[in-house]
Image (cartoon, grey):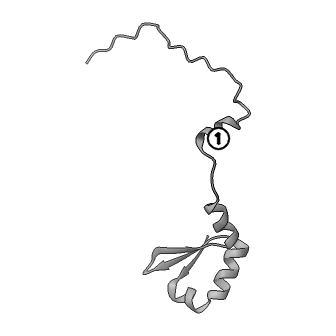
Amino acid sequence: MGKWQLQEAKARLSELVKRACEQGPQEITLRGEPAAVVLSAKAYQKLKANKPTLAAFLRASPLKDVELNLERDKSPTRDTQF
C-alpha cells in the first residue's frame, strides 16, 4: 500500500487516484498517523457488495453432505490437584 502525506496527496491528487486504480489502496497520513485510504471504484464496489449469510455460505459448501460425529466423549476425566 502506498503512503502519502496529506499535503502531497492534495498536490498530486490525479497521480494518487491513478495509483489507487493501478496498484491498489493508497494510504493518506495526517501528522504521521493514518487518516484515510483511497480505493479504486472497483475495489470499493467489491467491499460494498452484499455478502452471503452464514447459512447461505454453509448451504453452498461442497462439504454440506458430510456427516459429522457430534457424539460426546464419555471417558472419565483425569484427576487434577488444585
Other-residue count near label 1 (Cα within 10 Å), few / some / many at <14 / 14–19 / ≥20:
few
Residue labelled with disc 1: 56
Residue 11 lies, with reference to residue 58, above or below; the image says below
Which residue sits at x=46%, y=7%? 75
Quadrant for residue 39, please give it.
bottom right
Q: x and y percent of residue 35 in the render?
A: 47, 75
Relative placement, left or right, of 24 versus 32 is right
Q: Amino acid at mark 1?
A: Ala
Q: Nearer the viewer, residue 70 or 20?
A: 70
Relative placement, left or right, of 15 versus 32 is right
Residue 58 lies, with reference to residue 80, above or below; the image says below
Q: x and y percent of residue 76 in the render?
A: 42, 7
Secondary structure beneath label 1: helix
Which residue sits at x=51%, y=74%? 36
Q: Which residue is farthest left?
A: 82
Which residue sits at x=70%, y=69%? 42
Q: Nearer the viewer, residue 81 or 30?
A: 30
